[in-house]
Amino acid sequence: MTDKFDQQYAAFLDLVDSGTPETAIKKMELFGAEDELLQRIAERHERETIRIREREEPRSVILDNRYTWYTGPRPRDRYWPALEELLRKSGWSEQSLDDLDGASTKVVSLLSHPQVTKFSTKGLVVGYVQSGKTTNFTAVTAKAADRGYKLFIVLAGIHNGLRRQTQLRLVDQLVKPNPSRWLQLTDPDKDFTPPANAAAYLAKNNKQHVLCVIKKNPRVLEKFSAWLETASEYLADCPALIIDDEADQATVATETINPLIIEILGRLPKSAYVGYTATPFANLLIDPSVKDLYPEHFIVNLPKPKGHFGTEVLFGREVMDGEDPEEVFDGYDMIRQVPDSEVEFVRPSSRSDADGFQPVLTETIRTAIRYFWLSTAARRVRNAGNPHSTMLVHTSVNTAVHNSFKHPLTKLRNQSEALLRAGDADLLAELRKLWESETARVPAELFGEQPVAFDELAPLLPGVLHDCRIIMDNSGSKDRLDYENGPIVAIAVGGNTLSRGLTLEGLAVSFFVRSVSAYDTLLQMGRWFGFRNGYADLPRIWMTDELRDWFRHVATVESEMRRDIDVYMVEDKTPMTFAVRLRTHPSLRVTAAAKMTNAIPSASAYGGQRVQTRYFRTDHDWLAANQAAARRLVEKAVLEGSPEEDRQDDNELIRGVPHELVTDFLREYRFHEKSQECDSRLLTDYIARRIAKSGALRGWNIALIAGSAGKEAPKEFTYADGFTVRMATRSALPGDDTDTVDIKTLMSRRDAAIDLDTSSVQGELTEEKIKGLRLRQSPDTALLALYAVDKDSEPETRRAHSRRALNAAEDVIGVGLVFPPPSSDDSTVEWQYVATNLAKVRIEDEDLSGLDAVDY
């Protein structure tokens, strides 16, 4: 019975391919199908549709509750099953295949039905750098081909290397398994060259799917657009899928490429345009009210694949609203410092200095190179995972600077190889010390990898250096990275050609001091993101402390952006009724200035948030001024508030403090410029607005948090007569900046609930439980917590590798603020965010009448 029903359901799906569910049911009625069977078919299809729409991964934002016509692969499909089998044979796990199947099904379900008379769909898929976006759009292409899409145009970046890499992938995974069913207009070594008479050429091959992989280059796009113009009759009924890889590069706000892409879409009456990028900042800021490529129909967040090394994994990020700081991962200990004093030796200080620049291989870059050779030898001992091993050196965009590294790097390799073959004791001792230090900081067991002792890898080092190639990979070089001819070991020096989508196979070590100005540029140059199968413990990145801080900030921007998409999906918003917020930075642009012309400041609020200081200056004057401000506040609060007596936890609590004392303190206290959410003006402005709007925040509770009682003879800090507490200890994250320290976490969840009765709480005290308690017990009162932190704080033994001593000139005063959730719409302040301007958008219902004249 089940087999018969499955056959009938498959027949129903075949009919859906050329119509709608409603017309398919009507046709089956004409064929004599029973009402009970048709009812079961309709119910199953509805369940499948809901399952696709409500998939938790990938998250998406969809316009107008679009009809979900695609509910997944079918037994008679050709292209997806072939791709799936190829990936399985290459080592993909069943879980990874299931994840790819689900994510690609979600994207295809958001495209328009290929049988609609006319359509123009625009969407955006947001992935992670080096996370498998190409595989996802290959799967989307396969599934779209299985359902009747005919023309596939892949816009593969702006460089030949990425275009060639993409073409090879698509040929291997789509064309070769079904060679007779594909017509290729491009090949790996040749971009688009128009065949004569497009209409006749396409009509002759009408039964084949057409694949075209082209660069976003004006001359190429002009030729392609002109060629399409001659095939208008064929294209009238040709469903086309345009995949725009690296959709934020060249596509947005360019005078030549952007209009040409729009022109090409205009020549395709049935088109679905899907942009793919890991850095969608420019795409999210497109003006949606004009004819452009704003993703008006859907935005999809691809899930982060298991085992992926992304920004947050390597650099950590800031704490977001509702999170416990102790539960926010601070990144693996894989980042090494390039002192600012060494940058001038590896990067010219200005453009005029680029000509004739001669780099000096400083001790830091020599250490990075030696570690690269050591890690490559260790991987040979393991004999597992990616067979290639690459090091990236990226200091400048200038090709002359790249080329200047050839001689010193070659000389270092040759000299080192000769010393190793001669058994030089000094060099071997240095290498042993480096290897044992690095493997102690990042144990192999942490990643389930096999530890490798120095004595195991040492015999392989001469061979590693002999095999190591020094490659200058830039727009003017002939010797480029090529992974097709056997496993390679290479130190690659380059700039733009080594960024933006190009995969550096087996990338283990990066030396990066490139100057950048925008989020997207910064992220795309981080070729170290991706998968590290077989050597997850070995990657290292050398960069300046400033760059490390920038990457950490951008990791926070990414997380907030993705959370916005997730939240708005739940709230049934659409890309035309909400604008994703992007946190700004004082030194970096979100994207290029030309791409931000439609960006406007985005309002934010503090309601329900926990805000805390984590960055501090270390000089005497700055710290002493904050101590004085805290003492003045407490002295006045004791007089005007109600101190709570006989507390059992050694903290001090003063209830009912007037808001004027708090706002005076916030204006006087010196917040560090890196603590962007801790801004005196924004905080005091928010308090004033909320008082004016609802009367909340007139009264405050002030807590003086005591440090742990476990230490012998702990230091104490006196705020006022009778108000002395044990000092807290907070060590700092590593870094060479002696003027600023980052302690990451100041305030615990227990501290955030210090003025609440938590006796009724069952289980763990979570952020949501604290918000609920505050809303019930103290809905109009906020908490200000003060921390006196010992200036001589040392890291715990277990954190010795990932922390350093505070080394401040005076004891540090930290501040934590907990705002009650608003009872209605919160008061807002102009915070550090931008978003696209949706004010000019006029929302209209989508016309779906072209599909067999049936509304759905």
Image (cartoon, rainbow, N blue to C red):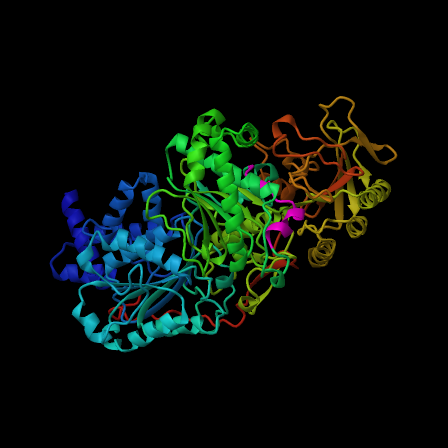
Q: Quadrant of the C terminus?
A: bottom left
Asked if residue 346 lies in the magenta stretch, the reply is yes
Name above or below for residue 726 compared with residue 253: above
Return the residue nearer the eye: 839 or 397: 397
Tally of numbered tags: 0
Q: Position of residue 588 (x, y in %)?
A: 61, 58
Q: Position of residue 763 (x, y in %)?
A: 55, 30
Q: Residue furthest left?
A: 32
Instruction: Say if residue 256 shows up in the picture.
Output: yes
Give the side of residue 640 with respect to residue 157, left or right. right
Q: Position of residue 686 (x, y in %)?
A: 70, 56
Give the side of residue 267 with respect to residue 795, left or right. left
Asked if residue 468 lies in the magenta stretch, the reply is no
Instruction: Say if residue 607 shows up in the picture.
Output: no
Return the residue nearer the eye: 578 or 264: 264
The residue shown at (19%, 59%) is 181
Q: Residue furthest top?
A: 712
Give the side of residue 307 with respect to residue 745, left or right. left
Q: Which residues are magenta?
A: 333-347
Give the side of residue 298 with respect to residue 553, left or right. left
